Amino acid sequence: MAKTLGLHILADLHGVDAERIDRVEDIRNLLETAVKVADLTKISSHYYQFQPHGATGVVLLAESHISIHTWPEHGLATVDVYTCGDPTKAYRAMEYIINTLEPKRVDKQVHERGTVGEEEQSEELRSILLSA
């Protein structure tokens, strides 16, 4: 039976208050807290302050990663949460980020990643069809 190994959530958060996404300190606090709330395992992180506005950050996880890139002058933050294992952790991390930033609109995509077992499933289906 086929299964996926990871869940990848991509979100564009529109209409975010510029004060919430302009300073690297706020971005660091946002991502570090999201990791804790979702019970993820942090390996390392890196953050950068852009001039005159905006910040970016990435947290490397044992489960994969969380990243954000912000354009406060446009009220925009793009967020990427990718985890392997328990998919509820990815949803919890993204939910925390969205609830904290309070965007007016969210454009979100969810992708299942790393499908395995398709060959076994295809072989099983082929044998069923051939025996019919």
Image (spheres, grey):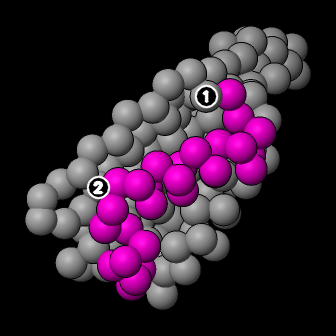
Question: In the rendered image, is residue 93 in sight?
Answer: yes
**Quadrant location, the N terminus:** top right
**Which secondary structure class fits the magenta region best?**
helix
* Residue sitting at the far left: 52
Q: Is residue 16 above or below residue 6?
A: below
In magenta segment, residue 39: yes
The amino acid at mark 2 is: Ala
Camera-side residue of 24 and 110? 24
At x 12%, y 59%, the residue is: 51
Residue at the image position 40 percent from the left and 83 percent from the top: 17
Q: Is residue 18 above or below residue 108?
A: below
Tag 1 or tag 2, which sits nearer the N-term? 1
Up-down: is 84 above or below 109? above
Task: Name the one closer to the observer, 1 or 72.
Answer: 72
Left or right: where 16 falls relative to 114: left
Residue 110's label in the rendered image is none
Residue 93 lies in magenta, yes or no?
no
Percent position of residue 33, x then y: 64, 50
For label 1, count other residues whose C-alpha is less than 10 Å away and answer few (under 14), some (14-19) or many (20+): some
The segment highlighted magenta reads: 15-41
Amino acid tagged 1? Lys
Where does residue 61 sit, x and y in percent of width and height? 58, 27
**Could you tell me residue 113's position as x and y percent?**
57, 33
Label 2: which secondary element: strand
The residue where tag 1 is placed is 42
Q: Which residue is identified by label 2?
A: 55
Question: Relative to 131, does residue 91 appear above or below in the rendering?
Answer: below
Q: Residue at horizontal 46%, vertical 49%?
A: 28
> Do the CB atoms of the residues marked 2 and 1 lie less than 8 Å apart?
no
> Can residue 115 be seen?
no
